Amino acid sequence: MVKENPTLLLAGIFILTTTFSQFINNSATAVLMAPIVLLAASTVGISPEPLLITVAVSASTAFLTPIGTTTNAMVISSGNYKFMDYFKVGLPLLIIFLITTLLLVPIIWPF
């Protein structure tokens, strides 16, 4: 099924990577996910480039929590933000990134 519709794999990789990115550093997330994605691409028989680009983009989408990104943690007290403020603003932004990635990555880096 994945061979016929690799966009589902792309979406799964995005969601898993961005979930990790909310709680750990984006560089660590990318290092954690890259070997998994390379193995998945070779198992399914598709090009690894679109999957790795998706990892790079989604690892940088720590918009939902102040934990995953140092910048978010730095401004939480000075901006008098609450934890849910990040979620309210970050979720629509994350959805925009997901849709944009799923639309553009297969066009620029074909499977």
Image (cartoon, helix red, strand yellow):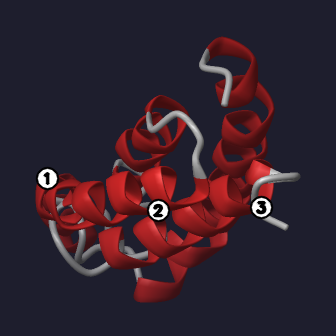
In the rendered structure, find residue 8 and report the number of the disc placed on it. 3
User: Residue 111, percent across and down?
Assistant: 66, 31
Residue located at (46% from left, 62% from top): 40
N-terminal of the pair, mark 2 or mark 3, is: 3
- Dot 3: few (<14), some (14–19), or many (≥20) neighbours within 10 Å? some
- Kindly report the distance in space between the C-alpha atoms of the residues bearing marks 3 and 1: 24 Å
**Residue furthest top in the image:** 108
User: Residue 65, percent across and down?
Assistant: 38, 76
Residue under label 2: 40
Residue under label 1: 27
Q: Give 109 or 60, whichever is nearer the viewer.
A: 109
- Kindly report the distance in space between the C-alpha atoms of the residues bearing marks 2 and 1: 20 Å
Kindly report which numbered mark, 3 or 1, lies closer to the viewer in this rendering. 3
Residue located at (35% from left, 52% from top): 38
Residue 13: quadrant of the picture: bottom right
Q: What secondary structure is marked by label 2?
A: helix
Q: Amino acid at mark 1?
A: Ser
Residue located at (73% from left, 35% from top): 100
Pointer 2 with pointer 1, Cβ within 8 A: no
Q: Amino acid at mark 2?
A: Ala
On screen, residue 12 above or below 106 = below
User: Residue 30, percent across and down?
Assistant: 23, 55
Residue located at (32% from left, 68% from top): 21
Q: Is residue 96 left or right of residue 72?
A: right
In the rendered structure, find residue 110 and report the number of the disc placed on it. none
Q: Give 27 or 85, whichever is nearer the viewer.
A: 27
